[in-house]
Amino acid sequence: MTTVLVLNGPNLSRLGSREPEIYGSETLSDIEKGLRERLPDGVALDFRQSDDEATLMGWLHEAADATTPVIFNPAAFTHYSYALRDACQIVADAGVAIIEVHLSNPHARETFRHTSVISGAVSGVIAGFGAQSYHLALTRILTLLERN
């Protein structure tokens, strides 16, 4: 069984009620349910959320050690967490796919959101498509798994 790890950063547990005009009305549980419905046989989903930077780093280290592909929405940590960037680099250096996702398009928002310290350490970035950003990332990871 292959597992795909989906990590969600700070405040994403508030989806559905937090600024729905920006983030949409789907909850994090709704996103998880939608992803689970798309999984092919032989692929499992490990879906997690934390507001704690150290917890997210630990999970990224686990992914590197287990060579588990990652879909990662670092949320606000995107713009300043060099520690998470380094943890993402550890995943990438282990030869593991890691895709950064965002519900909104950070480049269409406040200037401070235009910079991602995470992007340079990941396989790719998908942003601006709401919950569909996660689905697009899952599609890419499933494609990569099929090739291996």
Image: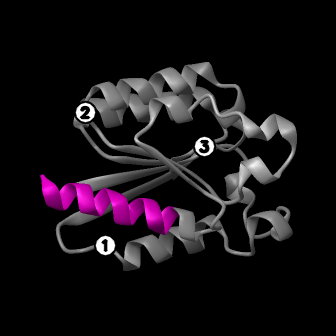
- Percent of width and height locating residue 133: 55, 63
Camera-side residue of 24 and 117: 117
The residue lying at 83 percent from left, 50 percent from top is 109
- Percent of width and height locating residue 59: 43, 35
Pointer 1 with pointer 2, Cβ within 8 A: no
What is the CA distance from the residue labelled 1 to the residue labelled 2?
22 Å
Q: Which residues are magenta?
A: 134-148
Q: Toward which corner of the image does residue 97 lie, by quadrant?
A: top left
Residue highlighted by disc 2:
95
Point out the tag, 1 or 2, that comes first from the N-terminus.
1
Q: Outermost residue, left direction?
A: 148
Q: Toward which corner of the image does residue 147 lie, by quadrant?
A: bottom left
The amino acid at mark 2 is Gly
- Percent of width and height locating residue 101: 56, 52
Q: Secondary structure at mark 1?
A: loop
Would you say the magenta stretch is mainly helix, strand or loop? helix
Q: Secondary structure at mark 3?
A: loop
The residue lying at 83 percent from left, 35 percent from top is 112
Residue highlighted by disc 1:
39
- Mark 2 Cα-neighbour bin, 10 Å: few <14, some 14–19, many ≥20: some
5 relative to 63, above or below: below
- Percent of width and height locating residue 132: 55, 70
Inspect the magenta stretch and tell me whether residue 137 lies in it. Answer: yes
Pair 1/2: label in front: 2
Point out the tag, 1 or 3, that comes first from the N-terminus.
1
82 relative to 53, above or below: above
